[in-house]
Amino acid sequence: MALETRSLTKRFGNFVAVDSVSFQLPAGKVLSLLGPSGCGKTTTLRMIAGFEHPTAGGILLEGRDITRLPARQRNIGMVFQSYALFPHLSAADNVIFGLHMRRIGRSERDERVARALEMVRMKSYGDRLPKSLSGGQQQRIALARALVIEPDLLLLDEPLSALDLKLREEMRDEIHRIVRELEITTVFVTHDQGEALVLSDLVAVMNAGRVEQMASPREVYRNPATAFVADFIGGANVLHGHRDPLDSRTFALDAGIALTFVSPLPPSATALSIRPEDVSLHPKGSSGIEATVRRSRYLGNALEYTLTLARGTTLNARTDGHSAFAEGDRVVLVIDTSRIAVLMGDTKNCHGG
């Protein structure tokens, strides 16, 4: 079912946790609310679930206003960060709990529980208590419990944050598989950009209670709307400056460097977003922008560098790891201007935490 929020706002005293958030999520699509701690993403999710009452604004599910509807009447499946399994109940009894509350008959209940456990690949673990299950297995049971009620909407509140890296990647792919198979409308809260980019049809990047940009994963990565989005998604270099008044294709950086573009730049351009992987490094003596390697980090499949440019400006670059430069080396860098995103307006104060 399609989900819509209209100017959704939540205040706690004088603190505005969510500030007029509006979006439309088509039926069967996955939206990630992405942002740092305290940006308002979990509060937004809890208002959609019915656990928090909005101060202002509305929530519509398939065109029906559910803003003031009690949580138990919304038919929404929720997976919590802490799993929230009942420790004294078996895995199967945890899954069945929502069906008991809905007074579903025994035969249908058993059939739906078996189907849900099969879906999350936990069919043979139904009689286990939560304490005998691994973190990943508990998360699968929590997901089965949310799905067994056949919800109109699935909400996931940072469900992978308590898992180690390998389990996180495994469960990320499992969630992706399941929500695609079921074609269930899903809202996923995370602070991990990798999870958001992999799982989502749409990503809403939140900062200080507001949505700074909502678009496809590719769009928010390649064409960030603000300096905050550029920095938060992929750690882009945001370099400030202005369009050359005598040449509309040239951008003069505050670092004392000028970059020339194929097409004219808008007069309101105030910064450039440059992805680390779009910066190539070459030995000193090559043609390009001179820099000094301040720090080098070996990542296995890549090398990441922090470089110092003219006037002390720093810039990050990421290479394939085959040609290494040492800290202190003088190098020359080349920036692919065709892959640069141009930022406009007030970008100096966009960053937040």
Image (cartoon, rainbow, N blue to C red):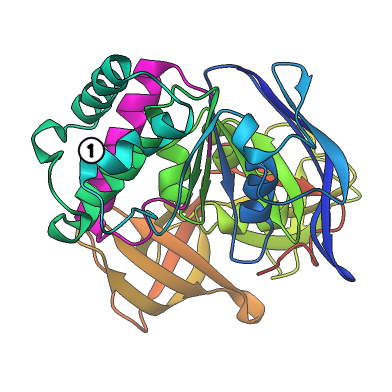
* Left or right: 342, with 160 as reference point: right
Q: Residue placed farthest to the left in the image?
A: 124
Q: Quarter holding the C terminus?
A: bottom right
Question: Which residue is located at x 68 percent, y 60 percent?
Answer: 39
Choose between 166 and 262: the one closer to the eye: 166
Question: Which residue is located at x 76 percent, y 58 percent?
Answer: 252
* Left or right: 192, with 243 as reference point: left
* Residue type, numbered disc 1: Ala
Which type of secondary structure does the marked residue at label 1 adopt?
A: helix
Q: Is residue 261 visible?
A: no
* Vertical arrangement, residue 200 with respect to residue 39, above or below: above
Choose between 39 and 51: the one closer to the eye: 51
* Left or right: 123, with 161 as reference point: left
Where does the image place residue 249, in percent across and percent down from the top left? 77, 40
- What stretch of residues is rendered in magenta? 158-187
| Residue 186 lies in the magenta stretch | yes
Which class describes the residues within 10 Å of circle 1: few (<14), some (14-19), or many (20+)?
many
* Vertical arrangement, residue 42 with respect to residue 24, above or below: below
Q: Quarter holding the N terminus?
A: top right
Q: Is residue 329 visible?
A: yes
* Vertical arrangement, residue 34 with respect to residue 223, above or below: below
Where does the image place residue 87, in percent across and percent down from the top left? 28, 59
Choose between 87 and 142: the one closer to the eye: 87
Where does the image place residue 347, in percent across and percent down from the top left? 79, 59
Q: Quadrant of residue 84?
A: bottom left
Q: How many numbered marks appear?
A: 1
Question: Which residue is located at x 67 percent, y 63 percent?
Answer: 257
Choose between 223 and 144: the one closer to the eye: 144
- What predominant SS class does the magenta segment belong to? helix
Question: Which residue is located at x 46 percent, y 60 percent?
Answer: 333
| Residue on which disc 1 sits | 92
